[in-house]
Amino acid sequence: MAKTESIEALLAPSLRVSRPVAACARCRSAKIKCDGKLPACSACERSGKATSCTSANDEFARGKERSYVAALEAAAQRLQKKIDAARAEAASHRALSGTQSTTGRPTQRRKISGARRKEASDVDELVSDFGFLTVNATSRDFHGFTSTMSFAKLLLSAAAREELPPLESRGLPPRYAITPMINQYLENVYVLFPFFSETDLMSSLSRIYHESSAISSTVTPLDVWYVRLILAIAYASSSQRKGDENDKTALQHMSAARGLAGYVLHPGSIAGVQALLLLVQYSLVDPAHYDPWYLVGMAARLMVDLGLHCEPSPETKISKSALDLRRRIFHCVYALDRLVSMSLDRAFSFTDDSASEVPLPESATDPSSSQVFQHSIKPCLYLFDIRRVQSAFYQSTRWSSRSQWPLATAATYASSVSNDIHAWYSTIPSTLSQRHLMLFNLERLYCQILVVSPNQRVPASSMTDLNKELVFEYSAQYADLLQPITQDVGWHAYLTFADISRAKYVGQKFVEVMWSDFDRLIKTTHAIREGSPLANNAPLDNGQRAAICLRKIIEILDFARHRWSMPEMREKFEQESAVLFSRLKTRQMELETAQYPSTIGVNAPAATSVGYGSMPSNIYPDSNAFPYQGSTMTQLPSPPINHDPVQPDVQQQAMLTPPEDYHMPTMYPMPQGSLPRRSYEFYGGRS
């Protein structure tokens, strides 16, 4: 039977512990047994040192107290201190609020503790270290109390290449003064990248200029951002050289809009992605101040953060207009990301496999009656189609692996992609504007150069003779079409930094292929297909054509020097092609010596000299030779076919370019063991 304790023992328990947690300091130094009695041990009481016994003070760290009772007492004291401090703070807040209600003074913001400020600083530092990682959660949790850094400041600081010049702040011009520039943007840029509603833009203009019953207080920073950025893009597109009137006006609008960045560039919202896409478009026409690749990469990550790369589930309740806007934003981000990344030879922000189920926007394919007086965005569908083909090929050949393909596999895959390009181009209707037809023809030539040019999978040493000839022909035609556009300001709305970077890529591939088989490419002659812009010119051998192509590419790159003060693109390409130019000049002089042995060096015609500074002005067609305002083009010319004048009976090599009556096949057969590829259904083929 258990021993029962008396009532007195329970009311007055002994404070002696059977086994103390730790001896006091005096007993430990004297090396005597300490009974651990509280509040002082027996040895300290006998020696009159009860007040100095360590069990009665706070010498031990938290969690290492001599007994559980002491630990509970210390915890109770700490909690009581916190309660007292909280009560005092609450009382002071009530007194302060009562004083402010009577005096009418504004309420002061609550001070942020040092620990929380340090936490916010750590988060901002982590975001800046990771760069492209999404900051949706951190931005919303810490918005409002960090005044030194925000998402907009972080974005603009990281993307800035050069600070905007200090300009006088001016208000918006009158409505009639900005209407032509707004229309220029809508006709040239918006129809290709419709990531916002034209109706919303007109509503913003009405609110800003008080053209409706809306009062001025309803004007939001996003309204002003839209108008300022669109005007900046339009004026920058119309500028011919850095520092002219249009360039200064564009910088004034951009400087005014930058002050609103903190209000509109927010992650976690569709409006924030739309505002960022406008900044991406501006960076393409002003790359001297902002890096387009960083901005479009951030836009892609915000888009993925919102889930726009995935279709909503059928159970999700979403309006038709909201769903269509999601699709338009996704495809615009996709098209811009592919455009910038491919032109700079960099990786994509996201792969095709991660966003392959988003259909094209229905508003572009089937406009409603409410859009009768709005601009048709149907051209964007053809642009979205070709971006898918470009993206799949670029990712497969540049970034999926660096191992070389067998020749048969590479030829089969390149042929299938080339067929996709022809199928897409055959669906483009002739009813589009002449500018859009020319734009899509340049896209076709660039795609063909991309397919047949050397890459990591197919180096130049493994290229077939046909591919080398096609690189020569496509590059010559690409330079012939793009060079006059750089000289005509009416076309500058379509001319961006990406187009100039593409021209540099074309020139580099042209030089690489020329060096890989110089003698054969120079000695081969080609017949110009009827209808080509070069068909009416005097026949030139490939040595002259190569020199002219290099010279035109240099003139295209010179646009960056005049427009954005970026001469390094031209200077680098001049250095890369200088030896090839010298060899072409030497060969041409040898031909002149063979043809005119008695007059060489005396009466040599000026048109035979090839060089950077001696190229005759009449070799290149004037910009008026490409007015693009004549009769409607049903199909732009294809590359010339290979022709051997010495052996005319030899069967000519089949061209990859389709004829006029080309129809898109339903499926391209692929041999067993070849690479997998997507089966594309182009919008033009469905309509």
Image (spheres, grey):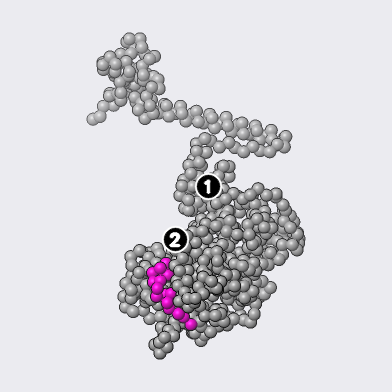
Q: Quadrant of residue 380?
A: bottom right
Residue 460 vs residue 251, the one in the foreground:
460
Quarter holding the C terminus? bottom right
Report the residue marked by disc 1.
Answer: 141
- Above or below 104: residue 600: below
Question: Can you give x and y, in whole percent of width and height, for residue 617 in the image?
Answer: 59, 70
**Magenta region's main secondary structure?**
helix
Question: Which mark is on residue 347?
Answer: 2
Q: Which is nearer the eye, 538 or 227?
A: 538
Q: Is residue 355 above or below residue 431?
A: above
Q: Is residue 410 above or below residue 212?
A: below
Secondary structure beneath label 2: loop
Quarter of the picture holding the N terminus: top left
Residue at 48% over, 51% down: 131
Mark nearer the viewer, 2 or 1: 2
Quick one: label 2, few (<14), some, or many (20+) residues within 10 Å? some
Span colored in magenta:
512-527
- Outermost residue to the bottom: 649
**Percent coordinates x, y for residue 521 in the rendering:** 42, 75
Disc 2 residue type?
Answer: Ala
Q: Residue at x 55, y 49 (%)?
A: 157
* Residue 515 magenta-highlighted: yes
User: At which x and y percent is residue 70?
Assistant: 38, 25
Q: CA distance from mark 2 to mark 1?
A: 31 Å
Identify the element where label 1 is drawn.
helix
